[in-house]
Image (cartoon, helix red, strand yellow):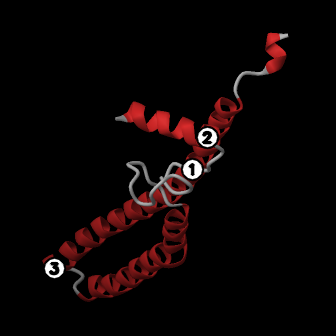
Amino acid sequence: MVWDEWEQIKAEAAAGHDRDLQGSGAGGTPGTADLKTSAQGKRGAIKALVEVIRPGLDKAGVHADETTDDAEREFQGWATGAGLKDAHDEWALQVSGLKARLAQEQELLGRTKRDFQLFEHGVESSLMRIARGPDPRRDA
């Protein structure tokens, strides 16, 4: 099956048709390819991380810190106060870990977007060399 698809791609390149890895373009049926990536989707996810999710996490983390600090002070010297402190320390660790993970995901989304673009350009370049045929200068 893969070989048949490769042969079809080569034939389309030789015929001068444009095609990308998402299966769109001349000769391809949008939405039918196995490999799909959406630069727009990755851009939207990165924007959501930068503008909504990460700032929202910061805001929620600070709010929880402030209210928990108040409760810890009110229950100081009681077992409840010690329990709140332990829970608050764990909360801080979890928020810190989530912040780091979201920053990593943001970086990886950006890198994936670039990697797919570079890969697609490389495949396109290879297909164009196939479509042009052998270099006549090499036969001379």
For disc 1, the marked residue is 19
Q: CA distance from mark 3 to mark 1?
A: 64 Å
SS under mark 2 = helix
Residue drawn 48% across and 68% down?
45
Image position, residue 63 (x, y; %): 39, 85
Residue 69 vs 109, above or below: the answer is below
Q: Earlier in the sequence, mark 2 or mark 3?
A: 2
In the picture, the disc for residue 102 is none
For disc 3, the marked residue is 80
1 or 2: mark nearer the eye: 2
Please rate how many residues cluster around mark 3, counting C-alpha atoms within 10 Å: few if below 14, some from 14 to 19, many from 20.
some
Q: Quadrant of the N terminus?
A: top left
Residue 110 vs 92, above or below: the answer is above
Q: Earlier in the sequence, mark 3 or mark 1?
A: 1
The amino acid at mark 3 is Thr
Residue drawn 31% across and 82% down?
68
**Could one spot residue 78 in this view of the protein?**
no
Q: CA distance from mark 1 to mark 2?
A: 8 Å
SS under mark 1 = loop
Residue drawn 70% across and 26% down?
133
Residue 30 vs 76, above or below: the answer is above
Residue 11 vs 17, above or below: the answer is above
In the picture, the disc for residue 13 is 2
Using the rendered view, name the quadrant where residue 89 is placed.
bottom left
2 or 3: mark nearer the eye: 2
Marks 3 and 1 in Cβ contact (< 8 Å): no
Image position, residue 28 (x, y; %): 48, 53
The amino acid at mark 2 is Ala
Residue 11 is left or right of residue 1, and the answer is right
Q: Residue furthest front?
A: 15
**Could one spot residue 118 in this view of the protein?**
yes
3 or 1: mark nearer the eye: 1
